[in-house]
Image (cartoon, rainbow, N blue to C red):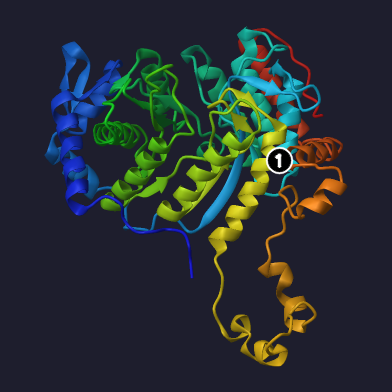
């Protein structure tokens, strides 16, 4: 039995109507690309470019050819994989000892990543260049790339300003030469479309530079239903999918990428406050629809991670993260949780990270399902025990209990009386104890040699004039 990768949720007619809407958006509205060289590349691929408007349109025939040349294979959306990822974005560090919100600095970032490193089901990650209170702004971007190389072994924190592209390219070239690996394996940055249907000049210039120098970039986007897309989910999904195809086309003409892999970063704007919430049911519905459309096109799908709008570890955070991750596991065949992240992407809590790690563990057990065979049916044991007996002391229970029973570390496993007599602690209390244990463990290990580290720091000095000391882990 398996419990992941369920059936289709959109009917065949609904999928076809969404596809038809996507084709009309791409042909009739098109996409603005504020870089003439990129427009020339698109025109050479067969797209129709309106130069005076820097707008490009894609005909149904163009899209039919694009899809025919894509690597698809109608693979299943997922394989039951469940994971946890702990990343750092703009926002506040929620100090486990003081329960106060603090600005990011280098030590807090490394401490946060260290906790993720030592958790069984959570991986540390850096993908956004975040202001740090102890690092000058004029060196922040190359410093972040150096930090990710040192502690993650690769750079995934992107490029946010065209003036830094030569510096980052040189750092990636130095790492590729030292590690004897191609640059595409060491760098996975993104530039983003401005929804709806626009790539701004800065992002377009970065993409063109990366194209010329063989540094593959992803193209992302975030669509807000009611803000940058129609408020109705059908219209928002169609627009989001049109932007997905625009991103795929740009990667095709720039880097030759042919794999169809669909992403979803769509949520509704809150009509009362204007926020872009991550923990709402409409975000889950949109992801389920996108999963169906990925099946329709025979592509792969990356479902959204379980996230929350709550400001502290609480029931709201657990419900929202669990709702999204469980629905994605059931409908799309894989799931993940953004471990530690709260308040959309504004608050980063080591306590929440440890609780989320426990949720990932439970979801992995759920995804595993169970086997049905002679050994697991245990008919001989049932006959041996007989009516009125018990199975606690059987050899069968001793042999199978560790794999058959999920083992919580934070979640309740006592009845009220024993819980009340043993301190009345709940998941947050146990997570805080675990945090202090993890914080005493070995520092976050370096992933590069001292020689490469010196080269990266020399490159930063060459481009910024600043000489920086090697980072020390905590």
Could you tell me which quadrant the C terminus lies in? top right
- Find disc 1 in the rendering and name its residue: 354
| Residue 364 on image: x %, y % | 59, 56
Q: Which residue is at 35% across, 15% downward? A: 200
Q: Which residue is at 58% across, 53% downward? A: 363
The image quarter in which residue 219 lies: top left
| Residue 236 on image: x %, y % | 28, 31
Q: Between 161 and 413, which is closer to the camera in this rendering?
A: 413
Q: Is mark 1 on a helix, strand or loop?
A: helix
The image quarter in which residue 262 lies: top left
Residue 439 in view: yes
Residue 15 lies left or right of residue 177; in this view the side is: left
| Residue 63 on image: x %, y % | 19, 40
The image quarter in which residue 153 lies: top right
Q: Estimate how packed mark 1 is, as few (under 14), some (14 to 19) or many (20 or more) residues with alpha carbons within 10 Å.
A: many
Q: Between 421 and 243, which is closer to the camera in this rendering?
A: 421
Q: Which residue is at 68% across, 26% downward? A: 147
Q: Between 20 and 189, which is closer to the camera in this rendering?
A: 20
Q: Which residue is at 56% across, 29% downward? A: 127
């Amino acid at each position: 039995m398996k419990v992941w990768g369920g059936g289709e949720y959109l009917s065949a007619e609904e999928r076809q109507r969404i596809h038809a809407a996507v084709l009309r958006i791409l042909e009739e509205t098109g996409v603005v690309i504020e870089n003439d060289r990129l427009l020339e590349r698109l025109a050479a691929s067969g797209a129709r470019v309106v130069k005076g408007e820097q707008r490009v349109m894609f005909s149904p025939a163009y899209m039919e050819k694009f899809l025919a040349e894509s690597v698809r294979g109608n693979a299943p959306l997922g394989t039951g994989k469940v994971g946890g990822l702990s990343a750092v974005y703009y926002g506040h560090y929620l100090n486990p000892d003081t329960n106060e919100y603090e600005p990011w600095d280098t030590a807090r970032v490394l401490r946060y990543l260290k906790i993720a490193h030592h958790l069984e089901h959570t991986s540390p990650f850096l993908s956004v260049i975040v202001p740090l209170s102890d690092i000058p702004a004029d060196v922040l971007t190359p410093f972040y790339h150096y930090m990710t190389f040192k502690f993650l072994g690769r750079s995934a924190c992107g490029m946010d300003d065209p003036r830094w592209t030569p510096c980052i390219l040189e750092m990636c070239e130095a790492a590729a030469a030292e590690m004897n690996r191609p640059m595409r394996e060491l760098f996975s940055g993104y530039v983003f479309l401005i929804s709806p249907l626009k790539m701004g000049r800065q992002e377009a210039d970065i993409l063109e530079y990366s194209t010329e120098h063989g540094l593959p970039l992803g193209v992302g986007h975030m669509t807000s239903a009611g803000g940058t897309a129609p408020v109705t989910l059908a219209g928002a999904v169609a627009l989001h999918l049109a932007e997905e195809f625009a991103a795929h086309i740009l990667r095709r003409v720039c880097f030759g990428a042919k794999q169809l892999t669909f992403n979803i970063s769509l949520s509704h704007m809150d009509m009362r406050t204007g926020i872009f919430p991550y923990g709402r049911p409409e975000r889950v519905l949109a992801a389920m629809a996108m999963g169906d459309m990925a099946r329709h096109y025979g592509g792969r799908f990356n479902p959204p991670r379980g996230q929350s709008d709550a400001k502290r570890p609480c029931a709201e955070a657990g419900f929202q993260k669990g709702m999204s991750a469980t629905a994605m596991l059931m409908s799309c065949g894989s799931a993940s949780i953004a471990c530690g992240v709260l308040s959309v992407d504004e608050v980063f809590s080591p306590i929440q990270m440890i609780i989320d790690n426990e949720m990932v563990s439970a979801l992995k057990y759920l995804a595993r399902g169970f086997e049905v065979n002679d050994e697991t049916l245990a008919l001989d044991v049932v006959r041996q025990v007989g009516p009125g007996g018990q199975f606690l002391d059987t050899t069968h229970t001793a042999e199978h209990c560790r794999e058959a029973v999920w083992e919580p570390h934070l979640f309740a496993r006592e009845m009220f009386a024993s819980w009340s007599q043993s301190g009345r602690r709940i998941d947050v209390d146990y997570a805080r104890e675990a945090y202090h244990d993890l914080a005493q463990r070995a520092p976050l290990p370096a992933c590069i040699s001292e020689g490469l580290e010196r080269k990266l720091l020399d490159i930063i000095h060459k481009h910024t004039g600043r000489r920086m000391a090697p980072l020390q882990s905590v």
